[in-house]
Image (tube, helix red, strand yellow):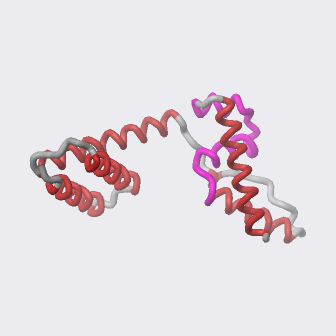
Amino acid sequence: MSKNFLIEAYRKLQAQVKRYGLSHAEEDALNDAFMKLWVGKYHPADEGEGEKLLYQSMRRRQISLWRSNRRHPQTSLADAQIAEPPPDDSDARDTYKQIWELIKTQLTPLQQDILKRHDVDDETYSEIADKLGMQEAAVRMQLSRARKKIREIYNKTKK
């Protein structure tokens, strides 16, 4: 059986995603579903069946992401109020801006959330673990990895 029906169904759904201006998450879900079906052993008999399979796979992926976000809610760094250096110390201010930008661009949303909760909101590891539905050791590990990553990147940019 040919995979042409699956390709046609994928193109049709992809056009719908673009036409309705859906988010990148929907487009990613569609691409993931297509890849899973493409490498799988099941091949649709016609375009309608291929479209149905892709739609169901995409829907399952979106539900899974939604459930994951409900289990592990994350706070945004946009609202974070972090003490800034004194206005008369321009070197400290530049360093602060560089590090803050690295945090926002180089860390995963989970790492940003844990960093904010621990360092800005002064939450303990166990409080963070309870709120995010994680093990306390996992929270410590994520925070440690986040700090290490920022240190490494910052030290490379200083050289």
**Could you tell me residue 67's position as x and y percent?**
43, 35
- Tell me which residue sits at (54%, 39%) in the image: 73
Dividing the picture into quadrants, the one containing residue 117 is: top right
Q: Relative to 58, is 135 above or below?
A: above
Q: Residue furthest left?
A: 46
**Could you tell me residue 16's position as x and y percent?**
24, 58
- Tell me which residue sits at (68%, 51%) in the image: 80
Dividing the picture into quadrants, the one containing residue 7 is: bottom left
Tell me which segment is drawn in magenta: 105-133
- Tell me which residue sits at (23%, 56%) in the image: 10
**Could you tell me residue 90's position as x and y percent?**
85, 71
Q: Position of 96 compared to 19: left or right?
A: right
Number of numbered markers: 0
Q: Nearer the viewer, residue 130 or 3?
A: 3
Question: Is 96 a magenta residue?
Answer: no
**Could you tell me residue 11's position as x and y percent?**
22, 60
Q: Position of 49 compared to 19: left or right?
A: left
* Viewport quadrant of the C terminus: bottom right
Q: Main secondary structure of the magenta part?
A: helix
- Tell me which residue sits at (71%, 56%) in the image: 150
Question: Is 109 a magenta residue?
Answer: yes
Q: Relative to 43, is 71 above or below?
A: above
Q: Position of 38 compared to 110: left or right?
A: left
Q: Relative to 158, is 24 above or below?
A: above
